[in-house]
Image (cartoon, helix red, strand yellow):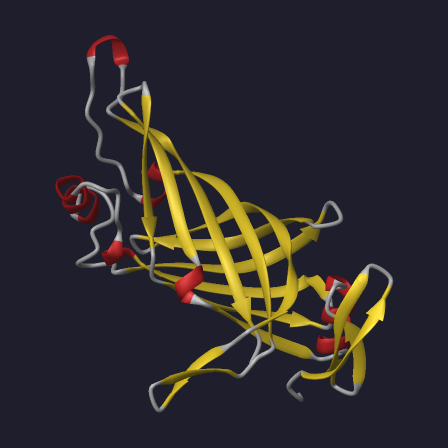
């Protein structure tokens, strides 16, 4: 697989655009779908999640009246796509559960202990896709095996494709940052809801009138940015 190289900048409909060459074919930088088709051609391509621009977040009801939110900043993984068909994507993601951050150290310590994630025994959360279906121009449904606390359940995630673009790629050389781009990047947002008790995350405190301290449903969201070498 060849890397992308700028050919020239020329005037097309809509103004000045830079034209790039992908594997011997050309594509304008303002056409996301064409770029992807031209770049991936008809072979499997691996995209790597950029951890600095990818994060997993969650929110759960607290004492029946509000939401507690948290995030995991260390998210790594790959997306392998056959050609330009996203329904063939093989998604494999690992989250470092020990880096959970809810904005309050005391709460973080509780969420990390054996009452909840038990990160000492289970330091990572893992997701591996099993099926993708396209339901709109840029919308997909993804099913996959989610593993939390050593328990694996198949879950549904609703995915929106945010597009693909040739972007700068800054690399430090001899104390100077050099742009070695363009490098193609694409983005997704995946959302889902799970029942925490399905994964053995079952600590609970009760309140008057049957109220719960912690809600059962956990809302998940993953903002992902991936690049191709």
Quadrant of the rendering where the N terminus is positioned: bottom right
Q: Residue furthest bottom?
A: 174
Residue at 65% in and 66% down: 165
Q: Residue at coordinates 73% horizontally, 63% vertically from top-left?
A: 32
Residue closest to the eye, 67 or 201: 67
Q: Is residue 16 above or below residue 199?
A: below
Tell me residue 208's x, y (percent).
Answer: 20, 10
Q: Which one is in front, 145 or 73?
A: 73
Q: Is residue 136 left or right of residue 96?
A: right
Q: Residue furthest right?
A: 13
Quarter of the figure with residue 214? top left
Report the front residue among 60 and 53.
53
Q: Position of residue 180 (x, y in %)?
A: 53, 83
Q: Quadrant of residue 42?
A: bottom right
Seen at 57% across and 55% down, the residue is 188
Instruction: Please tell me whether residue 145 is drawn above or below residue 6 in the rendered image.
Output: above
The residue positioned 47% from the left and 77% from the top of the image is: 170
Q: Nearer the viewer, residue 133 or 199?
A: 133
Quadrant location of the C terminus in the rendered image:
bottom right
Tag count:
0
> Going by the picture, which residue comes out furthest to the top?
209
């Amino acid at each position: 697989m060849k890397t992308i190289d700028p050919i020239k900048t020329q005037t097309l409909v809509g103004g000045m655009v830079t034209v790039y060459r992908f594997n011997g074919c050309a594509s304008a930088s303002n056409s996301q779908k064409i770029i992807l088709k031209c770049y991936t051609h008809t072979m499997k391509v691996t995209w790597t999640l950029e951890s600095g621009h990818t994060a997993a977040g969650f929110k759960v009801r607290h004492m029946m009246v509000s939401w507690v939110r948290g995030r995991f900043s260390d998210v790594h993984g790959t997306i392998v796509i056959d050609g330009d068909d996203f329904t063939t994507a093989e998604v494999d993601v690992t989250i470092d559960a020990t880096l959970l951050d809810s904005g309050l150290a005391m709460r973080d310590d509780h969420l990390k202990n054996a009452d909840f994630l038990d990160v000492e025994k289970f330091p990572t959360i893992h997701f591996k896709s099993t099926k993708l279906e396209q339901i709109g121009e840029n919308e997909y449904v993804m099913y996959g095996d989610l593993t939390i606390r050593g328990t694996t359940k198949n879950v549904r995630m609703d995915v929106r494709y945010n597009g693909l673009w040739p972007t700068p790629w800054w690399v430090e050389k001899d104390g100077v940052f050099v742009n070695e781009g363009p490098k193609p990047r694409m983005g997704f947002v995946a959302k889902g809801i799970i029942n925490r008790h399905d994964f053995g995350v079952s600590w609970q405190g009760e309140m008057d009138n049957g109220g719960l301290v912690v809600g059962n449903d956990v809302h998940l969201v993953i903002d992902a940015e991936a690049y191709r070498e």
